[in-house]
Image: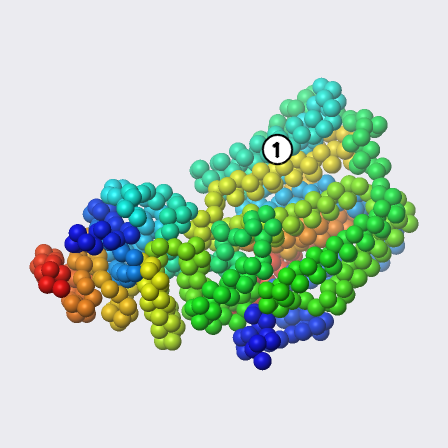
Amino acid sequence: MSATQQKDSVLSLRGISKTFGAVAALTDIDLDVAAGQVVAVVGDNGAGKSTLVKVLSGVHSPDSGTITFDSKTVGIPSPAAAHRLGIATVFQDLALCENLNVIQNLFLGQELRPLRLNEVAMETRSWELLRQLSAKIPSVRVPVASLSGGQRQTVAIARSLLGDPKIIILDEPTAALGVAQTAEVLNLVERLRENGLGVIMISHNMADVKAVADTVAVLRLGRNNGVFDVNDVSVEDIIAAITGATDNVVSQRRARRKEGLS
Amino acid sequence: MTTTLATDRQDERLQSREGLRGAVTDVIERARGGDLGVIPVVVGLVVIWAVLQILNPVFLSSTNLVNLTLESAAVGVIALGIVCVLLVGQIDLSVGSVSGLSGAVLAVLFVDKGLPVWAAILAAIALSAAIGWVYAQLFNRFGVPSFVITLAGLLAFLGLQLYVLGTKGSINLPFDSALVNFAQLAFVPQWLSYTFAVVAAAGLFASGYLHARERRRAGLSARTTSMLAVRSIALLAVLAFVVWYLGQTRGVGWMFVLFVALVLVMHYLLSRTKWGRSVYAVGGNVEAARRAGINVRAVYTSVFMLCSSFAAVGGILAAARLAAANQSSGAGDVNLNAIAAAVIGGTSLFGGRGTAFGALLGMIVIQSISSGLTLLNLDSSIRFVVTGVVLLLAVVVDSVARKSRTSHGRA
């Protein structure tokens, strides 16, 4: 974690901890995300990835630690607060209302003209967003229940773009997608980076991580287990860090030295 | 080709259905998929009316139908509140007691304490809104299931109603008061009824036309003007016929107009406002609604308060209609009729599905059964059984439609 990285970063976590009863889900987590940077957060099941996402999106409050956003220390007590700050989250379960149609889901909680909904403007904007993602959704006026898994993922990602966020968190965005749609999502992640957004991508798929991420942060049993530059690390090293096959300190030293050299 | 196509019609997989025939095909397709809308309730109503008319030729007479509209208003308003709580996936079983209590409070304040009638009405509604607020707090803070909270409320507020009425047990409202006059004798003059019908049809056409024009300007597909005209003329024909037929005797009661007006207001709130969207979202997927930044607790609070307030309005209308508040006001089948009306009107017990108009249609079904069986001089025991069976049928239709929606991907 070099000093320059901290200065640029839009979002910095320091010493974040969260326990559920006797279980320490997160212990002393540090994470930095800069504008135009894709940070992949990887880890085994139960490593604390989802808890970290929930802390950042305001679903859970951390027990200790500080969150710095735009060089101000902030609290994220609620999803609405996260939204106001400019942190948008696409959850793994997508959090879509199946009884509502695509437009209604996209604008849920941020409808235009609250007292006399502007359906036309919302529909036009929905089509813009979906075209931008080159999404293959035949109609935006059908209930989300009738869409396929990939189409739902697209709707969820399109929704996260509505509020012009600074940070987008994608929780396993390609887990349920076909080959072409995975490529579309990866293209989209790159487009988000080009637009200067910080992207946190939770993933199990090492190919996806190597393809789009700039930095890989490994979590293991709720703790940091190394932060790597994606160009300097092999898939085997990442997997070793995920499973704990390498000594923490050694891998961290190696990562530090590589950063110093580059 | 794509240049002339509307933005929302460009996907090649979309089957284009234009004009009147297309609209009919769409309805049939949707019904097959389990998106039944108002079809079952309209079919049910036709069957019930046909059977009751055969059993007793008085049933479809103008006199009886005028009565039916007046009788349906009170419980119909309560059903409107039930629709709201069902939409968020909750239930209020205490609407009967709360309506009885507010009738009693109204009578005590108005007759015994001599308050002006508007003050007594406001006090009764405010008290009920407060009851709804308490329900919501219990639900939000302690997570007690709403059916248990309101079941407790059912008993507690029945007790409070008996206490408020005191040893007399019954308070008569004076016949010359504006309230009783409104509920029993106030009918819309025939010319004004026709005006309402014309205004409704013109309003439907105007709003549809403006909306279609806005959509076309934004490059979206829209209904054609001729389709809109057909729809408005159909509405005008139906309303004019109803007004003419009811006008053969007393005409359209102001109380029924109030009920329909409340339905229209709720329809607007539910379908055209941010609040309405959040109600459907909470009913569909609470977690998704919460993560979308919707204040879920506030939605629950508003809905419980709204339901209790509608129960109060219904109780006041019932007291005015009877010109009295007594120990049996709001007791018996009021609760179940209100819930049955909402469910028969297509509101799903599973939340997130239903409309304000459902309360109107469902209420007319329930009231038809009740009125028809009364005309047949049948005992209330049989009436209860029949209403129970109809409610059960409605719930079965709801569950079957839900299964069918799931298998057709429309859940």
* B266 over B97 or under it: above or below: below
Would residue A245 be seen by someone viewing this image from the given angle? no
The reply to whether residue A230 is visible in this rendering is yes
Residue that sits furthest to the bottom in the current view? B1
Question: Is residue A77 shown above or below A101?
Answer: above
Q: Is residue B264 left or right of residue B218?
A: right
Q: Is residue B386 left or right of residue B272?
A: right
Residue B156 placement, left or right of A65: right
The residue sitting at 36% across, 43% down in the picture is A77
Q: Quadrant of the N terminus of chain B?
A: bottom right
Q: Counting other residues with Cα less than 10 Å from the Cα at mark 1, is it few (<14), some (14-19), or many (20 or more)?
A: many
Label 1 amino acid? Ser
Q: Position of residue B119 (x, y in %)?
A: 69, 26
Give percent across and percent down for residue B370: 76, 47
Location of residue B198 in the rendering, given as x and y in whole percent from the top left corner? 81, 54
Tell me which residue sits at (71%, 19%) in the image: B113
Helix, strand or loop at disc 1?
helix
Q: Determine which residue is flagged by label 1.
A: B128
For the point 56% across and 77% down, the residue is B2
- Given residues A2 and B113, the one toward you in this image is A2
Location of residue B173 in the rendering, given as x and y in whole percent from the top left corner: 78, 27
Q: Chain of mark 1?
A: B
Residue reaching furthest to the right? B248
The residue at the point 57 percent across, 36 percent down is B132
As rendered, which of B160 and B234 lies closer to the eye? B234
Q: How is the image coloured?
A: rainbow
Q: Quadrant of residue B335?
A: top right
From the viewer's side, name the closer residue of B270 and A48.
B270
